[in-house]
Amino acid sequence: MAVLSDRDILARMKDHPIVDPFEEKNLTPNGIDLRIKEIMLDGEVQPEGDFQLLPGEWMLVSTLEVIDMPKDLVGNLWLRSSWVRKGMLSSFGVVDSGFNGTLTMSGFNAGPNPIKINVGDRYLQMVILEMTTAVEKMYAERSGNYQGQRGITPPPRESGSTM
């Protein structure tokens, strides 16, 4: 696999819009920053505003950007380091080939101080990797659990779960 540079990403975006909406100011040398569209705190989705995540609190966020990953690319998700420096821990993941939708990611304030978080903040960086060969079966054909999701999508409830 090879990491796509900013130049590669711009070229690929002309043929296949990988993120929508795309703003070049969110392009990094080797990826794209993704912004928060909404925040779920205490089970309530907040589509706008500024919030404080207190020490020990957990949240879910969804991306503003819709991802449409082509069959020869995969996205690797990272929490932006500015959040890590504040004490935020988050889930990480891979955006599979063929995935289409928004992303839902978690956040946990492991630090000693409240963390200010706003709808619209850049939260994740997606590093885009080119695979050595295109996939045989895309995300929708393998599992596709979150294909087409829009907005925060909590995990499915398990029997006996309190979530």
Image (spheres, rainbow, N blue to C red):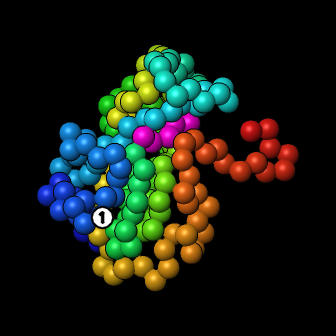
Q: Quadrant of the rendered structure where residue 76 is?
A: bottom left
The reply to whether residue 112 is in sight is: no
Taking 25 as reference, is 149 above or below it?
Answer: below
The reply to whether residue 29 is in sight is: yes
Q: Compare residues 131 and 101 and report the one nearer the observer.
A: 101
Looking at the rendering, in which quadrant would you find the C terminus?
Answer: top right
Taking 97 as reference, is 132 above or below it?
Answer: below
Magenta stretch contains residue 63:
yes
| Majority SS type along the magenta span | strand
Q: Quadrant of the rendered structure where residue 75 is?
A: bottom left
Indicate the position of residue 2 as horizontal and vertical percent values: 25, 68
What residue range appears in magenta?
60-64
Indicate the position of residue 103 as horizontal and vertical percent values: 49, 48
Picture residue at 34% right of the left edge, 39% below the top: 80
Considering the numbered disc 1 on the image, is that residue within a helix, a strand or a loop?
loop
Q: Which residue is tagged 1?
A: 16
